[in-house]
Amino acid sequence: MRSGPLDNLCDVPGIKVGHATDPVGITGCTAVLFEGPAGSGATVGVDVRGSSPGTRETARLAPMASVNDTHAVLLTGGSAFGLAAADGVVKFLEEKGTGLDVGVARIPLVSAAVIFDLMCGSPDARPDAAMGYEAAGNASSSGFDQGGVGAGTGATVGKILGPAHAMKGGVGSASFVFGEDSGDLMVAALAVVNAFGDVRENGETIAGPRLEDGTVGETLRLLPRAAERLTWGDNDGRNTTLALVATNARLSKLQMTKVAQMAHDGLARVINPVHATVDGDVVFAAALGDVPAATDVVGAWAAEALTKSVLRAVRSARSVGGVPGLRDT
């Protein structure tokens, strides 16, 4: 096992990633495009663990749903408003002739999920169709920026004491390759980290709530005396970690649903607490390829790639809007 050449999601053949970033409004979106053979998309499963999700076209990803292909996944800021950015991705793909052929048209199938970032920058700045179109147009297979860009522009972590005490989250990505040949198994992940909980590494909190003395506290220890932050109206679901894991394996939608479930373990290893009532945590899992592989192998390594992606997201994030990032500390 080794890291892929790019060590990010684009190591999986057929995947392109593009960002659109609003540095003034402090929001953005990230488009992941799937280019399978003969214009097909990816086989995508999903698992939603947070209790406050904002999503589009996730029911279509259920194992029993009849349509298999998905042509793109959009991860975006702007809370529910940001789902409008998916329309721009649809428009971009339609113009390229990508989509499900229904005879009278080709329909691009785009699933999406949002984070709540309205308090980091301007609450009136939200990704829209134009920004989604821009992100899709910027998509490339040669790599992409990480940290406070795209959907991670306004992402923060450790908000139990309120947004004024949070630290910066962002976008992170990683990949693993099993073997030395181009046709070997690949597993990769991308995370948008906007968690209620802390990000921890080797048992230590590296990003979480900032205390009055300037040190970083632990959300778990603060929970008993700050439980009001877990109620709607006080916290308003201002959190969520979004992720997409991908592989070049040949797996079904049912199998990729299981991969998405297993990949959530990667979040639990480094975010504490995770999957809370005020989180909208969602993991998509995409298969593009024909490499034989066992579901459990892909799922286990997807969790590893996601763990690495979360850590990379916060370590790559710079300070913005008065919220400190690890890149500058």
Image: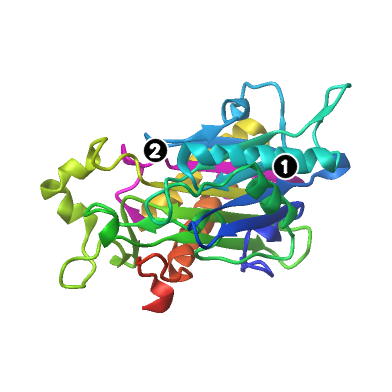
Callout 2: SS = loop
The Cα atoms of the two marked residues, 2 and 1, are separated by 28 Å
To which residue does mark 1 refer? 250
Name the quadrant containing residue 128.
top right
Q: In this view, does 134 lie above or below 104?
A: below
Q: Which amino acid lies under the numbered mark 1 shown in the image of this protein?
A: Arg
Q: For the point 71% across and 29% down, which residue is it? A: 68
Name the element at disc 1: loop
83 with respect to 215 (left or right): right
Q: Where is residue 176 in the image (x, y as percent from the top left)?
A: 61, 62
Q: Does the magenta stretch include residue 99?
A: no
Q: What stretch is highlighted in magenta?
A: 271-297
Residue 221 left/right relative to 245: left
Q: Name the residue under label 2.
A: 50
Crowd around label 2: few <14 · some 14–19 · many ≥20 (10 Å): many
Q: Which mark is residue 77?
A: none
